[in-house]
Image (tube, rainbow, N blue to C red):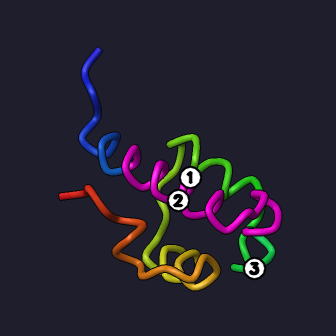
Amino acid sequence: MAIKPQAVPREFFAQNLQAARLRMGLSQQELASRCGLSRTEISLFERRARSPRLEMIVALSKALDVEPGELLEGIG
């Protein structure tokens, strides 16, 4: 089975997002509430099922008190 090109960036983003969330001690629901997204969206990002739009990356980074680049670390 071939890896889709977007799968690798999703993998890094998912790992970085989940690690940052857990460092803050937040549940998916708590993070979702902080950044105006649904818990389902957070889950989809962490399960590598969806890639976030730029606006979502910014909102997530603010809610997690990290630079957007930290969520994108390892991509590219």
Q: For the N terminus, which image quadrant?
A: top left
Which residue is under mark 3?
Answer: 34
52 left or right of 12 in image: right
Q: Are marks 3 and 2 in contact (CB under 8 Å)?
A: no
Q: Are marks 1 and 2 in contact (CB under 8 Å)?
A: yes
Specify few, some or many for label 1: CA neighbours under 10 Å numbering under 14, 14-19, or 20 or more. some
Q: Residue furthest top?
A: 1
Label 1 vs label 3, nearer the camera: 3
Which residue is under mark 1?
Answer: 45
Which residue is under mark 2?
Answer: 17
Q: Residue at x 25, y 57 (%)?
A: 75
- Start and end of the magenta stretch? 10-31
Q: Residue at x 81, y 68 (%)?
A: 30
Residue 56 lies in quadrant = bottom right
Position of residue 58 measured from the top left corner of the image (x, y, whole percent):
49, 82
Q: For the C terminus, which image quadrant?
A: bottom left
Q: Amino acid at mark 1?
A: Phe
